[in-house]
Image (cartoon, rainbow, N blue to C red):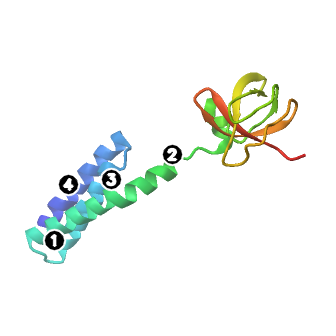
Amino acid sequence: MTALLWAIAGAAALGIELFTLDLTFALIALGAFAGAGAAALGAPLWGQMVVAGVVALAGLLFLRPIARRHLRRVPRELRTGVDALPGATAIALTSVTTEGGRIRLRNEEWSARLDTDVTDIQVDVGTRVYVTRIDGATAVVFPIGE
């Protein structure tokens, strides 16, 4: 009978997960189903609660962050706006240094500065550059070797 109650609680948590899509209630449901399994194996109520709590907590602390990180990844070709700019190439309109400069990036003029993790050598006008990231309204770039 206790196993059935755990299973009903798990099913209810899965039902809530369908509306939230946050993976929280899915992992709580997993804990409830683990509690149902412990009950089916004859564990006392306190043991069932410990099993359900440990499984749900472990899932929330360890599995959920990994799963969310993988679910949030958007393929490069589907990225839009500023998220689509890292990895693009541009042309230096002015010399670009670690302090600043201007580039033409996708037919727009952007402020830019060198990515000091790659180089700190000034880029001349007309040089092709690679965008590593966007920092506010500034493209962080490094020159592309010709």
What residue did someone put label 2 on? 72
Tell me the amino acid under the disc marked 1. Ala
Q: Secondary structure at mark 1?
A: helix
What residue did someone put label 3 on? 26
Numbered label attached to residue 9? 4
Tell me the amino acid under the disc marked 2. Arg
- Mark 1 is surrounded, within 10 Å at the Cα level, by few (under 14), some (14 to 19) or many (20 or more) other residues, namely many
At x 24%, y 56%, the residue is 10
Q: Earlier in the sequence, mark 3 or mark 1?
A: 3
Where residue 73 sits in the image (x, y, percent)?
Answer: 55, 47
Q: Earlier in the sequence, mark 4 or mark 3?
A: 4
Q: Earlier in the sequence, mark 1 or mark 4?
A: 4
What residue did someone put label 1 on? 39
Report the mark closest to the observer, 2 or 4: 2
Q: Secondary structure at mark 4?
A: helix
In the rendered view, does 129 fall on the left or right side of 7? right
Q: Label 3 to label 1, Cα distance in Å? A: 20 Å
